[in-house]
Amino acid sequence: MKHRMGFNRLRRKASHRKALHRSMATALFKYERIRTTKAKAREIRRTAEKMITRAKVDNVHNRRIIFKNIKDSYILNKLFTEIAPRFIDRPGGYTRMLKLGFRFSDASEMVLLELVERKEIVRNRKKKEEAVEEAAPKES
């Protein structure tokens, strides 16, 4: 029975699990979307949502607490200046998990863990279209 079990240990020692949480949370904030197993995603989601909640209030104390886990200053700054302000009006539920199916090698259930209000990446197709138009001879 799972009575009074606080979290999934993921079959790792404490130091390995801590490193996993740090690296995956950093990757989530860097790319705003990561592909991982369902078990890992459920644990990383808890860590990431606590960080976003703390980052809503931008002060030195909160930055130092989150810096204990996210060592990259660029990602830390992005969390406080870009990501957290998107969720000011949202009381929780900053991430979503989209099921992708099962991994071929070991049949682990794979998910896409992403931020709910993520910045869409717009591909710049104008440059390609302009290059094609310039290469094509014009009719006059």
Image (cartoon, rainbow, N blue to C red):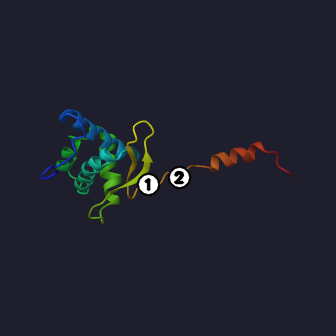
Q: Nearer the viewer, residue 99 or 63?
A: 99
For the residues labelled 1 and 2, the Cα–Cα distance comes to 9 Å
Outermost residue, right side: 140
The residue tagged 1 is 119
Outermost residue, bottom side: 89
Q: Secondary structure at mark 2?
A: loop
Q: Residues within 10 Å of mark 2 (few under 14, many from 20)?
A: few
The percent position of residue 40, horizontal first and vertical second, equals 30, 44
Whether 123 is drawn above or below 12: the answer is below
Q: Residues within 10 Å of mark 1 (few under 14, many from 20)?
A: few
Residue 135: assigned label? none
Q: Secondary structure at mark 1?
A: loop
The percent position of residue 33, horizontal first and vertical second, equals 40, 48
The percent position of residue 131, horizontal first and vertical second, equals 69, 44
The residue tagged 2 is 122
Amino acid type at mark 1: Lys
